[in-house]
Structures are given as structure tokens and as C-alpha cells.
Image (tube, rainbow, N blue to C red):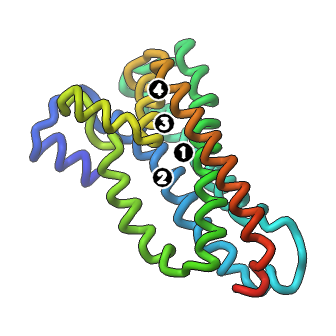
Amino acid sequence: MVYTFIFSRIMKVTMPHYALFMFIGLLAWNLFATGIQSSASVIVRQGSLVKKIYFPREILPLSVVGGSVINYLLSLAILVPFLFINGYYPTMNWLYVPLILLMETIFTVGLALLLSSLTVYLRDIEHMLGIFLMLWFYLTPVIYSLKILSPGIAQLFKLNPMSDVVLSFQSTLYYNESPHWKLFLYGYGISVVVLIFGWWLFTRLNRRFAEEV
């Protein structure tokens, strides 16, 4: 509501159904940000369990991200009626939504594994993460359209993997278009690379978790 008031009233954004545009982006961003922020310190928070019982530690960050995905799916119960109220009805483009959600989940899981393992050794990450996510939020077209930027700056913003996720959701649900295939492939490529690296790092650092927590 605050963003809607600021952008539609104070900054005079004339985009039709701006609240819907923003809500689509915020749901996608909240899945990512909540999953990352909560998973970063999950190994440390569950230190007593990690010390007492051996189990696949990957379960901890994976369960956090899984919870964020479930929250997103539950939020669709609000988003879908909101779409209908504003005159948006299901089309074939909506079939891309599960694929976009999978791309975001892969990316979020990769970062969750990476950050949760590093935070065991570098505890300051947990405190710096909030500031970093706030900066990342404003570099992602969640509450504004890239159309307000110059083409060159917009292209730089598209290098941000979360821009690809948000833009893809906006394309399918707000603009009723299929996602741009180059952005889609780039987003999936980055997500898979982050997942592989995050899993590799987690596996290597996992050996001393019990000693460090």
C-alpha cells in the first residue's frame, strides 16, 4: 500500500493497474528474500541439533526455501482473484508460471546453500544480508518498470537474475505475453550455475559444521 501510494500518487506513475503490477513483483521478491534471509543463519540456529545428530544438513536450508515456495503458492489465492477483478483472465501464457517459479526456486536454493554454509564460519554475513537485500530490491524492477530507464541501463539491470524472474512473472501475468526467451534461458543458466556452486560449497564446508556452531 505504501509503494502504491508513493508511486501512483506522489510520483504520478500512470501505469494502468499499477497495484497489480507491483503485487506480482512483490510476491516473487518476497519468496526470494524470505528464503535467503531465513536460510542464511539456519545452520547456526539449529546448532544443537547439528551437534547431536548426524543427518543431511542440506535439509535445513531446503526446508526454509520450501516454506517460502509454499507461502508463494498460498499467496496465489489472493493474486488470482486480484487478476480477475482487474480484468485479467487465464491464457496459455499462464502455463509459464510454474516454469518461472521453478527457475526462481533453483536460484534461491543455490544461494541458500551457499549463504547458510558460509554463515557458519562468517557470522557477520547474517547482519550484512539485510542491507544487501535492500539494495538488491531497488536494483530489481519490482515496484517500477524498466521502461522508465534508458535502454542501456535497462540492459544492465537485466543481468540481475532476479530481474529475469520478476520480468518473466510480469510478462505472463501482467502483460499477458510469453517471457522473453533470451532472458528466460539466461535466468535458468545462472540459476543452475548458482545451484551447482552452492551445493558444491555446502558439501565441502559441511564437514566442520558440528565443530563451528
Real-space Cα separation, disc 2 to disc 1, in angstroms: 11 Å
Q: Which residue is mark 1?
A: 75
Residue drawn at (40%, 60%) of the image: 133
Residue drawn at (65%, 72%) of the image: 42
Q: Amino acid at mark 1?
A: Ser
Residue 13 at x, y percent in the picture = 15, 35
Residue at the extreme top: 92
Residue 139 is at least partly visible in this image: yes
Residue 180 at x, y percent in the picture = 45, 19
Of callouts 2 and 1, which one flags the residue occurring earlier in the amino acid sequence?
2
Q: Which residue is mark 4?
A: 183
Eye-nearest disc, 2 or 3: 3
Of callouts 2 and 4, which one flags the residue occurring earlier in the amino acid sequence?
2
Real-space Cα separation, disc 4 to disc 1, in angstroms: 25 Å
Category of crowding for the residue at label 3, using alpha-carbon neighbours closer than 10 angstroms: few (below 14), some (14–19), many (at least 20): many
Task: Describe the element under mark 4 as helix, strand or loop.
Answer: helix
Eye-nearest disc, 2 or 4: 4
Q: Which residue is mark 2?
A: 30
Q: Amino acid at mark 4?
A: Leu
Residue 61 or 67: which is nearer the viewer?
Answer: 61
Of callouts 4 and 1, which one flags the residue occurring earlier in the amino acid sequence?
1
Q: Which residue is mark 3?
A: 165
